[in-house]
Amino acid sequence: MQLIQSLEQMKGLEHPHGSKLGFVPTMGYLHEGHLSLVERAKQDNDITVVSIFVNPAQFGPNEDLQTYPRDLERDLALLEERGVNYVFSPDDAIMYPPGYLTWVEVEKLSTILCGASRPGHFRGVCTVVLKLINIIKPHRMYMGEKDFQQLIILRKMVEDLNLDVQIIGCPIVREDDGLAKSSRNVYLDADQRKNAVAIYQAMLHASRQVAAGQRQAHELVTEITDRLISAGAKPDYVKIVNSKDLSDVDHVGQDSRIMVAAWFGKTRLIDNMPLIT
């Protein structure tokens, strides 16, 4: 495995003719969710590249950029164990040099759900991912469905900008009790960690309600919200949306998906689940 921190070196890599390159973009502090993407990329491609870059452009002024968990040495050891070919880990000055002025934004989709709570977040995500695609030139890019809004937005960016890369969405990886794996889970204290499973349990309950015949979205949203509040959470949003375009739905159908963001103390967690499988 080769660690690359130079833009010129990453762009200058030559690969065997006809080989397929799979790419997993991350902000590091890797967990089993990230590593499942790596395994899928290795399975599908001849060469696997993982980026590790804590992107300052996707953090708001009062968010956790400075305290976001980092452990590059540990990350590199995990990736080497899994046979990754290259790790691209640039610094801020490489990705956003002095005088940087160019930004990418997918309108409409970026201002709802997490975009409403985190203005500018998806502008930062789209910009850095487009830059990484241009630098690495992958055939396929692998992203987890936990960040479902991000997945939909980046697919729209790829479509609209005619980028020659396929985005592969991969299933959410969960803890044994159902909590979605997240680098931010380390912020939770013992009580918050115990209570945080309420997100998964509330979504699972809603899914069972749908299976039993409930189709009214607002009733399901109310029930999920009440369950989160009872578990000590402060809901940011609870929505049932069309999974293709993230639009709100009144009546649960084949493409409906629960989208949840909730605060447990100072930690904001997100999760989602399809309602009809």
Image: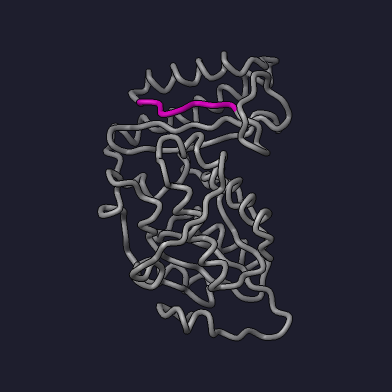
Give yes or no for residue 236 being in the magenta stretch.
yes
Residue 250 place in picture, x, y as percent = 64, 19
Q: Which residues are magenta?
A: 234-240
Q: At x 26% / y 54%, what residue is drawn?
A: 66
Above or below for 68 versus 265:
below
**In this picture, residue 217 sits left or right of residue 31:** right
Above or below for 43 versus 105:
below
Residue 48 place in picture, x, y as percent = 58, 72
Q: What secondary structure prevails in the magenta region? A: strand
**In this picture, residue 46 sits left or right of residue 229:** right
Residue 272 occupies quadrant = top right
Above or below for 31 versus 272:
below
Q: At x 55% / y 57%, what residue is drawn?
A: 36
Q: At x 73% / y 80%, what residue is drawn?
A: 18
Q: Give the number of marks.
A: 0
Specify the color scheme.
Answer: one colour
Q: Which residue occupies the foreground of this view, 157 or 40?
A: 157
Residue 88 place in picture, x, y as percent = 46, 73
Residue 29 place in picture, x, y as percent = 38, 59
Q: Quadrant of the C terminus?
A: top right
Give yes or no for residue 2 being in the magenta stretch.
no
Q: At x 63% / y 84%, what residue is drawn?
A: 15
Above or below for 35 versus 208:
below
Q: Which residue occupies the foreground of this view, 130 or 186?
A: 130
